[in-house]
């Protein structure tokens, strides 16, 4: 039902969203467990063991997580018709296609409570619950600048890879460099959060900024924990946002334009046994003749070099082409003077539908001649030009009926049907657009999830500053001042993580692009869709954060001073 | 006789079905130190909260400097608490992520005092309270007495007309408590600040000029203290 491309794209999207969702589950459950610590201390006082407390905490979290999962499934089922019609990939789906299987439901009903149990037990490890009450373990030391080391190593590796980058491929070290940079961002996140908080404290004035930035600098790990899930998504989303549109411009090579209307059908594919021979000479001649007989077509046959069918063939040349073909399709190159036919290395032209790889002629004057009879050679492929769309469809229909079935290049990969190079570029571009859209959706969702994580962290963390905040209210601090504190505590890590990650990803992808692009290619810019997606995600996240503000009003109201 | 700075007449306050004050009357003159005493649950803290404009009474009248607190809305009472009152509670309620200097400067910053001036004032107050070298310490690094002195500095730094203190030495040992009360009352008298403090400790109450005894939600006695300083 879904091609390998879509499965891959959805898989990337799921991974990008899964990480922050797991963090949200962990944050919410962990805070809920920590807020029950005084109740657990009372249990210890009457004789419960630490193991008993753990069991109570686990049951607590399972029940609430299960209820939440069931509620979430209900919301999903209600929203399913709208989701199916959303057209995220450019097409609509039937509702049955966007629903998990029975196993999928079962996994959710088991996995979410399981993650909650683990998170709650981990949260209880941060406090020491004794019969006499709760004591917090000492505050963690501030994050060290050594956390930047991994990020630095990744950047160095990436730059080394860039130095080895050519127009056709990115240098191998760049890939692990990219991965290490992503890991490095997560490791360096707390240090960066603390650094940004200290900078904000110097730049922003007022009591709200003082409170918010000092609280952030006091425990930057907790602040970053809620947003680290979005680092991966924003990083990938920004890279996709730069490179996918830019890749289209790299496809606009002279050969791609010249070949745009040329249809390719291939009858042999490379494999472990060497290149397949293709159509037998007589069958190949019949096919070429009948294609020409359709009218409005010009057919250019490409033949298989006899020795190329040998699995032990080592030479660079695998095909043979008539020099008259090259005279008509000059973009493909030219023969040495006086030749009738030339050997050709048509690997990129025939076995890749990306004309980008055909920037160099596949025959030039240095290619050796072929002196045998072309009619005796197997037919490897045909290039066909037509005089209009109707003729193109007649050619396609003929090939579908009379040409041998297409052979795929790898298991699980659909064979490529005959199509023009322009159609191949359009398909590639369309897939890239869909991929880009999916990644943007995942990024927006991830930012939203990060906002929810922050809201949960802030709301759940209100118990700690409840007393001092209550006194501030009692002393005449307007509640809107404390609202500003909470908003700043949420916005600073969220914005810092997003901006730093996006900036780094943009810089790295631009550098990679400039290494691969021909000189003079303009620097790719992020499009309005990217900014709209980021803006929408951040806006919704801020709204979610705003939902916690009434909780602050209630928890720190002057009424609470009665219980001090 | 000076007209009272604060007075309350027939104040009634309930929380749900539980009456905390059943018609309390009290007067506080400017510059005096009034101790509000009584057994647990007598309503003494509730009386302080009503006098400070934290809660509006259900019935009765409360006045501060001629302004009727019982007729003010929450916004106006909040502004009054910010500009005219200071608060010291039993556990200090300092913001743990801030340093001592930050905590003292915070109410000044909230009052839109410029940062430099706020921290200068904070430094001066910390010096007066014997904490000159503790300004950059976080509250977790201070002893109980030091933290409570920071709370006193914070309350006095804004130049309040009235200081409300609820069990200010409740979490301190007697020696430390004496030091805190010496400083609190000494600085209040020096600054001309009126003090209303709630305590169940007779030794703390002895610092006051007068003592109001609260029982069953009513002020049953108003006595002048024998001495105006604590037991030495």
Image (cartoon, grey):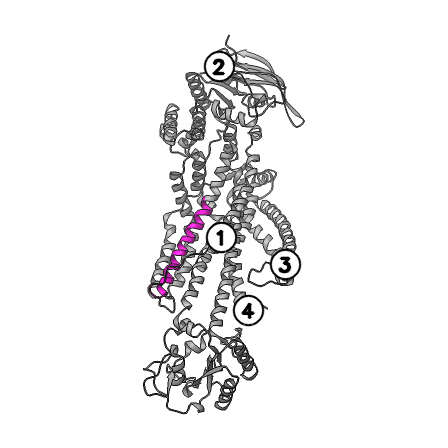
Which residue is more in the foreground, A365 or A455? A365
Check whether the beta carbons of the residues at disc 2 and disc 4 lie within 8 A of each other: no
**Residue assigned mark 1:** A532
Other residues around mark 4 within 10 Å, as few (<14) / some (14–19) / many (≥20): few
Could you tell me which secondary element the residue under label 4 belongs to?
loop
Could you tell me which secondary element the residue under label 3 belongs to?
helix
**Residue assigned mark 3:** A105
User: Magenta span has A510?
Assistant: yes
Ranked by sequence position, the earlier of labels 4 and 3 is 4
Whether residue B96 is situated above or below residue B43 in the rendered picture:
below
Where is residue B46 drawn, in percent x and y?
A: 58, 23
Q: Are marks 4 and 1 on the same chain?
A: yes
Q: Chain of mark 1?
A: A
Check whether the beta carbons of the residues at disc 1 and disc 3 lie within 8 A of each other: no
Q: CA separation, marks 2 and 4?
A: 84 Å
Q: CA separation, marks 1 and 2?
A: 61 Å
Q: Chain of mark 2?
A: B
Location of residue B16 (image quadrant): top right
Q: Are marks 4 and 3 on the same chain?
A: yes
Q: Chain of mark 3?
A: A
Which residue is more in the foreground, A465 or A486? A486
Q: Magenta span covers which residues?
A: A492-521
């Amino acid at each position: 039902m879904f091609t390998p491309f879509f499965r891959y794209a959805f898989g990337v999207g799921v991974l990008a969203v899964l990480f922050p969702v797991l963090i949200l589950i962990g944050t919410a459950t962990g805070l809920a467990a920590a807020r029950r610590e005084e109740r657990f201390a009372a249990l210890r006082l009457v004789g419960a063991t630490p193991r008993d407390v753990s069991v109570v905490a686990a049951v607590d979290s399972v029940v609430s997580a299960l209820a939440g999962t069931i509620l979430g499934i209900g919301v999903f089922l209600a929203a399913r018709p709208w989701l199916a019609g959303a057209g995220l990939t450019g097409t609509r789906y039937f509702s049955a296609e966007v629903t998990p299987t029975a196993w999928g439901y079962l996994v959710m009903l088991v996995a979410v409570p399981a993650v909650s149990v683990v998170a709650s037990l981990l949260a209880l490890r941060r406090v020491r619950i004794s019969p006499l009450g709760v004591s917090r373990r000492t505050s963690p030391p501030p994050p060290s600048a050594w956390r930047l080391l991994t990020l630095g190593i990744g950047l160095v590796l990436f730059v080394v890879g860039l130095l080895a980058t050519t127009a056709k491929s990115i240098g191998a070290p760049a890939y692990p460099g990219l991965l290490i940079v992503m890991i490095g961002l997560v490791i360096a996140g707390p240090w960066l959060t603390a650094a940004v908080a200290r900078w904000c404290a110097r730049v922003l004035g007022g009591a709200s900024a003082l409170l918010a930035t000092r609280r952030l600098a006091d425990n930057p790990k907790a602040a970053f924990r809620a947003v680290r899930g979005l680092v991966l998504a924003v990083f990938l989303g920004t890279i996709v946002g730069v490179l996918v549109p830019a890749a289209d411009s790299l496809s606009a090579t002279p050969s791609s334009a010249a070949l745009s209307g040329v249809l390719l059908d291939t009858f042999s594919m490379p494999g472990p046994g060497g290149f397949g021979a293709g159509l037998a000479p007589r069958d190949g001649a019949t096919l070429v003749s009948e294609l020409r007989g359709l009218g409005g077509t010009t057919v250019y046959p490409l033949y298989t070099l006899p020795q190329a069918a040998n699995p032990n063939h080592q030479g660079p040349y695998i095909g043979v082409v008539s020099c008259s073909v090259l005279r008509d399709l000059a973009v493909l190159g030219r023969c040495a003077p006086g030749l009738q036919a030339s050997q050709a290395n048509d690997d990129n032209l025939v076995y890749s539908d990306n004309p980008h790889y055909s920037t160099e002629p596949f025959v030039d004057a240095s290619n050796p001649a072929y002196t045998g009879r072309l009619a005796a050679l197997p037919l490897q492929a045909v290039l066909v030009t037509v005089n209009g769309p109707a003729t193109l469809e007649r050619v396609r229909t003929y090939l579908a009926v009379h040409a041998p079935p297409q052979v795929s290049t790898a298991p699980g990969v659909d064979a490529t049907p005959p199509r023009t190079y322009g159609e191949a570029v359009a398909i590639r571009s369309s897939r890239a657009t869909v991929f880009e859209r999916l990644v943007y959706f995942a990024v927006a969702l991830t930012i939203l999830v990060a906002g929810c994580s922050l809201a949960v962290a802030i709301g759940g963390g209100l118990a700690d500053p409840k007393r001092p905040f209550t006194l501030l209210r009692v002393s005449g601090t307007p509640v809107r001042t404390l609202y500003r504190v909470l908003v700043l505590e949420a916005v600073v890590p969220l914005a810092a993580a997003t901006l730093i990650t996006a900036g780094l990803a943009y810089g790295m992808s631009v550098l990679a692009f400039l290494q691969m692009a021909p000189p003079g290619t303009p620097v790719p810019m992020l499009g309005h869709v990217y900014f709209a997606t980021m803006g929408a995600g951040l806006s919704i996240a801020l709204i979610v954060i705003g939902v916690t503000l009434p909780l602050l009003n209630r928890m720190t109201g002057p009424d609470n001073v009665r219980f001090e | 006789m000076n007209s009272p700075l604060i007075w309350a007449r027939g104040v009634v306050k309930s929380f749900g079905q539980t009456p905390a004050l059943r018609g309390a009357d009290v007067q506080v003159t400017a510059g005096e130190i009034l101790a509000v005493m009584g057994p647990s649950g007598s309503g003494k803290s509730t009386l302080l909260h009503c006098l400070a404009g934290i809660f509006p009474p259900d019935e009765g009248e409360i006045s501060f400097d001629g302004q009727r607190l019982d007729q003010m809305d929450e916004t106006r009472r909040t502004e009054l608490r910010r500009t005219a009152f200071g608060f010291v509670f039993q556990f200090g309620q300092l913001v743990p992520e801030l340093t001592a200097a930050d905590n003292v400067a915070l109410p000044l910053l909230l009052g839109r005092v410029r940062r430099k001036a706020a921290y200068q004032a904070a430094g001066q107050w910390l010096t007066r309270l014997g904490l000159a070298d503790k300004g950059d310490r976080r509250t977790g690094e201070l002893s109980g007495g030091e933290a409570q002195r920071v709370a006193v500095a914070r309350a006095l730094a804004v130049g309040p007309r009235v200081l409300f203190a609820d069990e200010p030495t409740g979490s301190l040992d007697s020696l430390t408590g004496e030091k805190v009360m010496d400083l609190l009352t000494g600085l209040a008298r020096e600054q001309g600040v009126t003090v209303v403090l709630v305590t169940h400790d007779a030794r703390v109450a002895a610092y006051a000029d007068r003592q109001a005894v609260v029982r069953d939600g009513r002020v049953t006695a108003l006595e002048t203290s024998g001495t105006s300083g604590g037991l030495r």
